[in-house]
Image (tube, grey):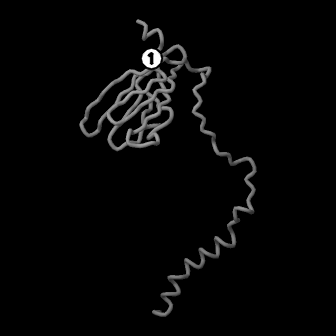
Amino acid sequence: MNKLLPLLLLLPTLAHAQITEQTLPTIEETTLGDTLQVPDFNFSTERRANSDVGTGAILRGLDRITGAVNNFSMAVGETLQFERLEITLEACRYPVGNINADAYALLKIRDIRNEEPSFYGWMFASSPALSALDHPRYDVWVLSCEAASESSE
């Protein structure tokens, strides 16, 4: 029995190797055709039919170490500095006719110590965790958009 034990331990490994080599097709043998497509991530700021364009946005920033929370208003195209972050608002959109319903903003956020942005994409006010800044110390999220009529009042 002691002589058979090493063979019994190797048997599942050998059986698995035979199954995968003999029964599974290789990638060259399978034809995927047009069924496999890589999505094109286009951060276009063009206006969609179901959204209105905001002239600015209200953002909230959190310093996780000190617990300090700051709200700040930005105009589209503006860049401001929050602690060690440089934040650029490229666009802000909201549902047609209801600016208070939801907001989504195209933001570029860069730590001033790095060349590359820490975040570049759309942030959603209703789901901040869906597309969030991944920074060890700071957190930034969108609260709402501002329209031209609101800023003139």
List the single residue furthest toward the left: 66
Seen in the picture, residue 116 relative to 75 is either above or below; the reply is below
Question: Residue 80 location, x and y as percent?
Answer: 39, 27
Label count reads: 1
Question: Residue 143 location, x and y as percent?
Answer: 40, 25
Residues 88 and 44: in front is 88
Residues 118 and 57: in front is 118
Q: Residue at x 34, y 44 (%)?
A: 136
Seen in the picture, residue 98 relative to 113 is either above or below; the reply is above
Q: Residues within 10 Å of mark 1 (few under 14, many from 20)?
A: many
Check disc 1 and give the amino acid type.
Glu
Q: Residue at x 49, y 93 (%)?
A: 3
Question: Residue 95 location, x and y as percent?
Answer: 53, 20
Q: Quadrant of the C terminus?
A: top left
SS category of the residue bearing label 1: strand
Q: Residue at x 47, y 16 (%)?
A: 99
128 horizontally vs 48: left or right: left
**In which quadrant of the rendered view does residue 135 lie?**
top left
**In which quadrant of the rendered view does residue 44 lie?**
top right
Residues 2 and 28: in front is 28
Question: Residue 101 location, x and y as percent?
Answer: 46, 20
List the single residue furthest toward the top: 153
Task: Provide the residue designation for mark 1.
Answer: 146
